[in-house]
Image: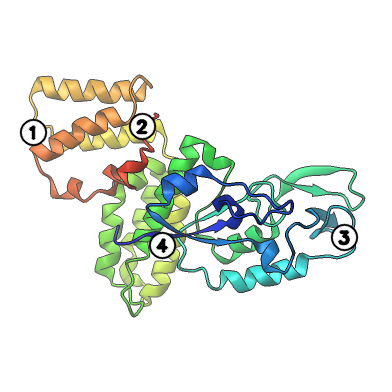
Amino acid sequence: MSGPIPVGISACLLGQAVRFDGGHKSLSFARDALAPWVHFEPVCPEMAIGLPVPRPALRLIEQDSAIRLVYSNRSPGDLTQQMQHFARQQTRKLHHLCGYIVCAKSPSCGLERVRIYDPDGKNNRKAGTGIFTAELQQALPWLPIEEDGRLTDPAIRENFVERICALYELNQVPDAAGRVSRGAMMAFHSRYKLLLLAHSQPDYRALGRFVAQMHQWPDMALFFAEYRLRVMALLAHHATRRNHTNVLMHVQGYFRPQLTSRQRQELATLIDHYRQGLQPLLAPLALLRHYMAEYPNDYLAQQRYFDPYPAALRLRYGY
């Protein structure tokens, strides 16, 4: 990477004492693991609209078929329009971001399963999205967004980091003047082919057909915008053991002429053990990397599949 990845984050997750009770929800994964690779841009939407610390807690209610942001202690005041206005103003400044980490369960920042109450406060259901995050999703539909609670799951954590790294690299495709060349676009897609295949075979094929029609787009900026939507939606599918096995077997084929019968059997057995869950992904990858060093291949050498994010994050170690 040529520089730190710009990522938005709820300020409380960086340890800032901005929550309604004067506390924070410091997220160690962000503060410790990601910090060397990421430039965080923190914001607390509730403070941004002028609320103090401490302050009455907020909640979402459904009233007249609309979701409203109000005080949970029934103090007068509807903060929905203020929050939406701030969010719309803020998201116009965030097109450079490659990801966003939001605070779970928050009526302003929660990503999913935020409680929505009846106006009288007696009943609730976990079916909402925070007002700020909902506007963020609408304004930047390609942006990887996760919340702190979900990032404790290793698969979700890896998928999020993989997506922010991919978007960061994709955002380098336009030149300083914002121009997008077909060559640069094709080079990016070529580097990501194996990684995309690990996430979704049907979507990989559909995206390939879309890229093959690139020459029909007179405006490459529009093509870039559509490609960004499609490729980030594809990467949002979690890579599966079955798809990884398919990619590993595909890569194995590149070395068939050079390997002895014993080496081919050893590699095939290791891949099958991964398929069965007897070995982590790193085991066949390590052997394939060894053969890539022994028998260099230009196509494989440029594949982002082998290094989708900084190795120091150790995100593939557990499966």
In terms of depth relative to the viewer, which is nearer, 271 or 123? 123
Q: CA distance from mark 4 to mark 2?
A: 31 Å
Q: Are marks 4 and 2 in contact (CB under 8 Å)?
A: no
* Left or right: where 64 falls relative to 138: right
Residue under the image location 17 percent in, 20 percent down: 265
Nearer the camera: disc 1 or disc 2: 2
- Earlier in the chain: of badge 4 and badge 2, it is 4
Q: Which residue is mark 4?
A: 227
- Earlier in the chain: of badge 4 and badge 1, it is 4
Q: Which mark is on residue 257?
A: 1
Residue 112 locus on image (x, y percent): 65, 47
- Earlier in the chain: of badge 4 and badge 3, it is 3
- Earlier in the chain: of badge 2 and badge 3, it is 3
Q: CA distance from mark 1 to mark 2?
A: 30 Å
Amino acid type for the residue under numbered disc 4: Tyr
In terms of depth relative to the viewer, which is nearer, 204 or 282? 282
Q: Which residue is mark 3?
A: 64
Q: Secondary structure at mark 2?
A: loop
Nearer the camera: disc 2 or disc 3: 2
- Earlier in the chain: of badge 1 and badge 3, it is 3
Amino acid type for the residue under numbered disc 1: Pro
Q: Which mark is on residue 317?
A: 2
In this rendering, the answer to whether 266 lies above or below 172 is above
